[in-house]
Image (tube, rainbow, N blue to C red):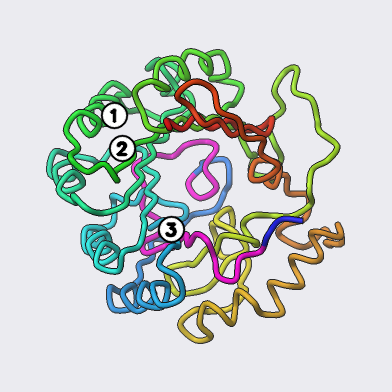
Amino acid sequence: MREKYRFPRKFQIGFQEGTCPLRCNKCFAFSPKIGRVKKATKMSMENAKRLLDEIAELNNDSIIQPHMQTEPFANMDLKQIIRYCGEKNLTMSIITNGILLDREWLDFIISQSEQRITMSFSLDAVSQETYEKVRGNYQLELIEERINFLLNNRKNTRLRIGVNFVIEKANKKEKEVFLEKWKYLADVVRIGTLISHDKKTYKLEGMKERRDWVLECDSLNEIMAIDSDGSVRVCPMDAFGDTNLGNVFEEGIEAIWNGSKMEELRNNIKLNGLSNKEFCFGCEAYKHEGNFIHRVENEFEIAENGYQIHYNHR
């Protein structure tokens, strides 16, 4: 059984949702295949600071991801949020498509000289042709230039730069090339298989199903997904607010995290007792999240579970 933290290890917070320059087919919020429209919503800075204050008081070792299903750099308040997290000594994890990162943004990130920040760029390709198939109509080369700018100009040893590759049919032939291109440049390379809109794992050719998967979800044991209005979602894949486990501004983080709704859901997942009407029914995301085998190989710490592999520079 995986450990359930007393408080969330990570907070994925929709400070601003519903804004992204891309419409990736795999996206849970903006894919044209979904047939639903994600409305733009925003948390006030007053509420954002109130929430971050509560998190810092609970445990300042927690990680803040300032977005759920959106592009974080579309949020004009993001600089204030980053600075405020720095004041509260909160670690940040920012996942971006990199499209909105102009020179002003790059200089700002570099200027946060003492703050613990990991920036991960979702690329999913090494060629322009493949990038357009899996992500959209933008120049991959420009995003790569911004990544290299950060790698070459950062003065903060606590600023970590990562790249992500989600394997699907259109890009699977580029996986090994991607890894070899980036593993000696970026601080971390994450490669994982696609989770479809019906929450199924994309099966790679030759992939062997393990029989020892633990039926538990890290999104409920370690991560709290908070929408712009303070509502706690089952996980970030709930892009349209179909679930609600409580409101942090009304009940507080601790009461929801250790409350009856989350405990019941954790137990139902563990016992495989979900009804087919529940959001989590049939979800295979737990195969991505847990059951990692860790090893050290030369200068890398590698975590692998058959559906994901992470290369971290030691």
Say if the magenta span includes residue 298.
no
The magenta stretch is 4-30
Mark closer to the observer (3, 1): 3
User: Which quadrant holds the N terminus?
Assistant: bottom right
The span from disc 3 to disc 1 (Cα, nearest Å) is: 25 Å
- Mark 2 closeness class: few <14, some 14–19, many ≥20 residues within 10 Å: many
Residue 33 image-quadrant placement: top right
Residue underneath mark 1: 143
Residue 223: percent from left, percent from top: 56, 60
Marker disc for residue 63: 3
Q: Amino acid at mark 1?
A: Ile
Determine whether the residue tagged by mark 2 lies in a helix, strand or loop: loop
Q: Which residue is mark 2?
A: 98
The prevailing secondary structure element of the residues shown in magenta is: loop
Q: At label 2, which amino acid type do we have?
A: Gly
The percent position of residue 168, horizontal first and vertical second, equals: 59, 26
